[in-house]
Structure formats: structure tokens, C-alpha cells
Amino acid sequence: MMRTMVDGILIAALLTFVPSSRGAEASGRVVTYPAPAGDFVSNDYQVQAGGQKVDVYGARVLDAPFAGKEYDYGGPYCFANFDMAGPVTVRVTSERSLRNTVIRPQSAGVRMTVVDDHTLSLTLDKPCKFSVEPDGRKGPLLLFANPLETDAPKEGDPNVVYFGPGVHKPEKISLGTGQTLYLAGGAVVKAEVYAQGENIRICGRGILDGSDWEWRKGPVGNLIAIRNSANVEVTGITLRGSSHWTIVPSSSRNVTIRNVKLCNSRVQNDDGINPCNSQDVRITDCFIRSDDDCVALKGLDLGAANNNVERITVENSILWCDRARIFLLGHESRAAYMRDVTLRNLDIIHFTMTPFLLEPGEDMRMENIVIEDIRIHGEGQREFIRLRPVVNQYMHNKVPGFIRDVRFRNVTLDGSPGEYLVQIEGADAAHDVQNVTFENVSILGTKLTSASPPVRIGGHVQSVHFDGAGSQP
């Protein structure tokens, strides 16, 4: 009897420490979430993580009325999520050739082995996000390896709006003070979310899906609209197919967007994350693919008590924009200040228009902008950086703005040859650009200086510095 009890204890202990991944090639733990029946899954790729099947979802590019235009961003693509801890081997197979696959970004640290023409073995040491690209932009697989979920709320809690596995169609979800929206792994929730209040949380491993609505016809106007709120966190979820701007903190403060994956490019105007007239917004550990701007800082409300756009941080993230800009600062400038903005430790893996476009108007003062530790993959684009106060069609007061104290530090652009213009120009004597620094910025392996061919410095500009050299002009 005693021997039987001891044996049972030993077996239970061994089972406790067996990781959920299977097979000798994996030593870490993996958690997967089966896709619900009836959702838009893809057969373009088959994925296993730690020996477990990982379902692959489909994403779309350029629905009507944009389909069939002259531009082509590679067609439909796929994405998949799983959770992990410890080293994990991922196996990817496809009927298409995988022989020339590239993993972006390199900083993800994924080690790839081409097993055969249709099979890849990927080794991941830690959670990360990356793009598996057999043919560049054409039909990639986006893989999101999340950390293990540790703080899932309980179903039945009166302050939790809970969606378990399956397809759900509530269309509109409203959240108020103290409420949590939870999307469990394997949940696809077809809704837009309106949040207003304090201490609000949106979390989980599920998918918030806006792809059933035509362009600009969603019930809220954003996939997640955060209005006049404080202490809001959006974490862990995947967003697919927004019909308009995707996550918009407006007139809000203390907003954190963490480990969020945006799989857009179905329509135009699907901006990724747009902090508007908000303060203390942190965007961290995210993957954003959009047709329109990945991150745009805007001032839309001149009459708010505190309408400035201040203390915005975007960090530790991967960005891909099909048609527009990676960062757009100031096109809607109805605020006195846009300042204390930090963009750091970022990988820009695909872009089309100017990645860094700073164009304030309406007398907005754009100041104290730090852009550092950025890695960019270029494909021969014409523009890289543009700093220029302007007047445009989005502005109510038809006057330019100001730019002060912008620092680019440890920024590298590699890839194919191109112009990659760096343009700095004031609007007039009153609306000028002052104090711009380039420190350890390189294009195609050559450090940027005032004499570099891409550099264009126009009028009404004061104090542009390159790596400790004297100011130009």
C-alpha cells in the first residue's frame, strides 16, 4: 500500500513538470488556442509550436472600394498566436516554396533552419513577434509568441464583460469605470468598443474583429475608442480588419497599450494607434500592420481643458505600413503643444511613404521629440525623414506650427538602394525649425552628415547638428 502511494506521488510530480509542448525538439512550455468553427482561417501555412498545432487565421488587404487599384501590397496574409515560456521550436510548412524565407525583424532573434523546400524549423528562446516572409510582402505569415497569460479575470465577475472561445457578434461593447473586457484565447469578437471612465482594462488572448463592417461604417467609429478616460490598459489581444482608425485614446491620460497585435490593411484610414489630445500614453511590445499610418499623434479638440498631446512613448515594437507613414505627428494640430514624445527600440520592417513625418500647423509647438534605437528595412523609397511646419486640408486655422528640439540617435536604415531623403524646412520666419540633432544615424551603412546626398535643409531652419559637428546651416 505504501509503495503504491509513493509511486502515485512520483507520477503526479512528474506530470506537473511535463511541459505542454510535445516532442524531443522542444523544452519550453506552449499554450495554444484552437480557432472557433466558422472563422476566417487560412490553409496557406501549417504551424506547430512545441509539437502542438497552432491554428492560422486569415487577414485581408484592400477590400472594396480599394481593391483593384494600381497599388498592390502583397495580397492576403496570415497570422497566428500562441503563448510560451522557455525555448520552443516552431515548425512551419506550406505548399509554397519556403527555401528563400526571410525572418523580419532580425532583432527578434529567431534562428531558422530550412528543413526542405516546404518546411522551416524556427527556434525561439523567448516570446517575440515576427514576420515569416517567403517572398517579401507577398502573403507572409505573422507569428505572435506571447508570454504565458497569468492574470485572466474570472467569468461571472460582475465587473467583467467576458467572452469565451467561439465567434461572438455583440457589435458594440460599452465599458465604464472599473470594468474589464476579457477576450479568451479562441474567442473572435465582432464588435467595436467604446470605453469611458477610469480604471478600465481590455485584455486576453482573443481577437477583436472589425472586418464585417464596410469602410467607415462601424457602430463606434473606432475598433477601440477610449474617450475622456484615465488609467486604461489594453493588453494581449489581437485586432483584425478595422474599418477606420483602430485604437484611439482621445482626451485621455495614463493609457497603456501592451502586447497588442494589429492585423489591418483591409481598408484605408485604418490608422493603428492615434493618441489625440491625450497625455501619458505608452505603446509597448506591439506589432502593427496597417494600410494607413501606424501611429499618428493628433490634436482634434482645441476647446478641451487640457488638449495637449504630451508624454507619448512608443517602444519595443514592430511596425509595418502598407501605404502611408509609420509615424505622423501633427497633421491635425488643434492643440497648443505636442511635446515630450519618445520613439525608441523599434523595428520598421516595411514602409512606403515617409516613415517619420513631423508637420505641425495651427500654431502648435512640436517640441522635445526623441527618436532612438530604430532599425529600418528600406526597399528603395524616396523619403526617410521630413520635418516641416505646414498648412494642410485638415487644419482649421490656416497657419503653420513650430518644431523645436528633435533628436535622432542610433538609427539605421539598411536594405535596397534609394534616395531616402532627409528634409528639414521651416514655413516662414515666424514658423521655423530649431535644434535638430542626428547622432549615429546611418543610411545603407554610411553615417549621415550635413554633406550626405539625402540631406536637404531649406530656409527658416536653425541649428542642425550631425554627430557633434557644428550646426548647419
Image (spheres, helix red, strand yellow):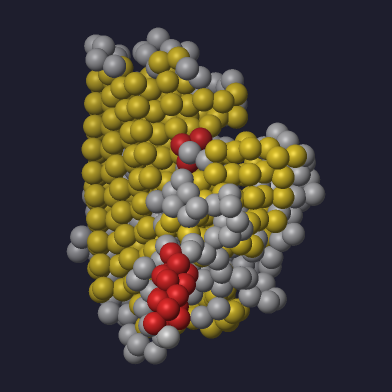
Percent across and percent down for residue 132 are 62, 44
Q: Going 48% across and 32% down the picture, which residue do you hit?
A: 376
Farthest-out residue, left: 305
From what the image shows, is residue 196 above or below residue 24?
below
Residue 203 found in image quarter: bottom left
Relative to residue 364, is residue 350 drawn left or right? right
Image side of residue 145 versus residue 57, left or right: left
349 versus 410 height, above or below:
below
Query: Quick one: quadrant of the C terminus?
Result: top left
Residue 302 sits in quarter: bottom left
Pinpoint residue 10: horizontal percent, then vertical percent.
42, 71
Q: Is residue 95 visible?
A: yes
Seen as rendered, the residue at the extreme right is 95
**Could you tell me residue 237's position as x and y percent?**
47, 65
From what the image shows, is residue 111 above or below residue 42? Answer: above
* Foreground of the two, 64 or 391: 64
Viewer-nearest residue: 165 or 416: 165
Q: Quick check: 398 left or right of 121?
A: left
Q: Position of residue 157 (x, y in %)?
A: 35, 87
The quadrant of the image that shows the N terminus is bottom left
At 31% from the left and 17% from the top, the residue drawn is: 466
